[in-house]
Amino acid sequence: MFIIDPILWEDDRNGNPRYCHIASIILFCIDSITNTGHNFFLRPFLRGAPRLGGVRGVNPLQSTRPDMKLSTTYDVAVIGGGPAGMMAAGRAAACGARVILLEKNGVLGKKLLLTGGGRCNLTNATFDRNVFLSKFHGASKFLHSPLASFGIQDTLDFFAGLGVPTKTEEENRVFPKNDKAESILEALRHYMADGDVTVVTDAEVDGLKRVDGAIDGIRLKDGKTICARSYILTTGGRSHPQTGSTGDGFGWLQELGHTILEPRPSLVPVRIRESWALTLSGLGFTDAKLTVLQDGKRHSDARGKILFTHFGLSGPLVLNMSRTIGELMKNGTVTVSVDLLPTIDISTLDLELRTMFETSKNKSVIHGLEGIVPYSCLKVILELSGIKAEKPVHDITREERQSIAKALKGLQMTVEGLLDADKAIVTSGGVTPKEVDFKHMRSRLHPNLYLAGDILDIDRPSGGYSLQLCWTTGYVAGTSAAGRSNRT
Ligand SMILES: Cc1cc2nc3c(=O)[nH]c(=O)nc-3n(C[C@H](O)[C@H](O)[C@H](O)COP(=O)(O)OP(=O)(O)OC[C@H]3O[C@@H](n4cnc5c(N)ncnc54)[C@H](O)[C@@H]3O)c2cc1C
């Protein structure tokens, strides 16, 4: 049961109602007790209302439904309930704006829950801003200003403040202490609930309405229209489209005159031709060196974690080099060479193998090499070197020992291709940064349109950089969009 109070409905448009009409309070109590879900109608009246049952006005885990009335004008409307959208919505609300967030899925943060293998690598603890920005290549010049507003320490403090302590692992990767991406999602939901953000799930946006160069409304697929003073677009890129990131925002922005660089898989695993490589599926190396070659010539190399999979290679090192591999493939065949023991040079390794063999003369060679790399990998190394695993160590020739060392230092594989966008961690491409005022994350073409997260064409490596970009740009977009609505 609910009654709409016409006076408050009209008078409270600018957003800071610290008082509740008596009728609204009564209704809120009824709503809280019966949990009918009608609180959608009450939320605009209840901003700043005293908490009942610990949560202000609405159960943060319960979303409202699109079949409810959606004709109210909001200060800020956010499209996309991923990390960037949730941060932007929560921040705009914390700045005093009346905010609505629209998400086409039935739940928020589907992709967020997949991050870091379900553990959510939420940022990278590289506190020196210049060092952090050096990872963003050409886009770094755009990010100085937003990172100054909301940087890495701000992210750690923000989540700690929401009850999510973090820990830092190898390569400065930061995870929630409990290793659960859900806790990050939960924190963001609470952040939004604290600001009385109206969250509408199952609300698929069809496009944006424009009048006189400004955005005038959001068209929902079901025909409804949402109006706000400012709009924040956080519909993401095109990686893992099953999570909802189908690139819808790119089409709308193109219609609005923005330049969209064609999205393509960026951080993506690599398909390998050799069948022996696929037999190593599941095997990971924390410190390997990957060299990318074309026509036998070394193009680039780097060290880090790799993972053999049922299709080829993955892991942070491979993901980070996938863009280079993709670019080189346009010119012809690309091969990669994996050094499984990058900390020692080949002559030192040969010496070590000699010492190992001297102490295990009567063992089979596979047992003589035990411990150097995992057993399944040893089998492959011996096969590639043309040596039978059972051959006694005392029968191994110098040339055979050297070819074992060579294989350990350079497993050669032919790249068959990159996996498709649906397997990419990130797609590169999106709105060209030149068309965005990064100080406010505002479109340079439309004064009341703000952009954040993966929708922007910003290349970055794996390691928490993508989510930091969401927190930073989402925060700045939320602040600016709310500021704008406060001024007008
Ligand atoms: C498997 C995997 C693991 C990853 N791991 C990490 C990691 O550990 N660390 C890291 O930093 N990054 C990681 N990333 C990248 C990170 O997840 C993204 O950078 C981030 O999710 C982008 O956030 P976003 O809010 O911009 O967009 P998204 O998360 O893509 O969210 C966009 C939202 O908009 C909604 N939407 C789209 N169209 C519409 C529409 N028409 N109407 C309404 N709603 C719409 C979508 O349903 C979606 O919920 C990973 C990515 C993947 C795929």
Image (cartoon, rainbow, N blue to C red):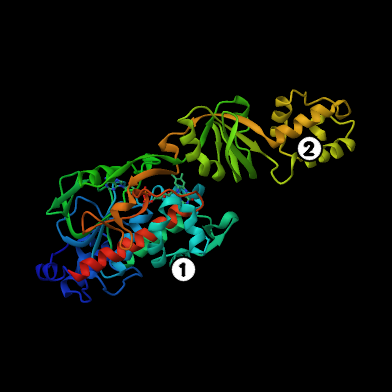
List the single residue furthest toward the bottom: 19
Image coordinates for residue 465, horizontal then vertical, percent: 47, 54
- Residue appearing at x 59%, y 25% in the figure: 274
Q: Amino acid at mark 2?
A: Glu
**Element assignment for label 1:** helix
Q: Earlier in the sequence, mark 2 or mark 1?
A: 1
| Up/down of 105 relative to 417, above or below | below
Circle on res. 447:
none
**Residue name at image x 75 percent, y 34 percent:** 405
Which residue is outermost to the left?
6
Image quarter where the C terminus lies is bottom left
Residue 323: x percent and y percent? 47, 40
Name the residue nearer the viewer: 299 or 449.
Answer: 299
Frontmost residue, 377 versus 415:
415
Quarter residue 187 falls in: bottom left
Q: Position of residue 91 (x, y in %)?
A: 33, 65
The local crowd at label 2, few if under 14, some if 14 to 19, many if 20 or more residues have their Cα within 10 Å, is: few
Residue 157: give its label: 1
Amino acid tagged 1: Asp
Which quarter of the rendering shows the N terminus? bottom left
Residue 23: x, y in percent? Answer: 16, 72
Please, is residue 356 above or below residue 134 in the view? above
Along the horizontal axis of the image, is 150 left or right of 358?
left
Q: Is residue 281 left or right of residue 460?
A: right
| Towards the viewer: 107 or 436 | 436
In this view, 341 is above or below 470:
above
- Which residue matches tag 2? 370
CA gap, disc 2 and disc 1:
46 Å
- Where is residue 167, by image quadrant? bottom right
Q: Is mark 2 within 8 Å of ligand 1?
A: no
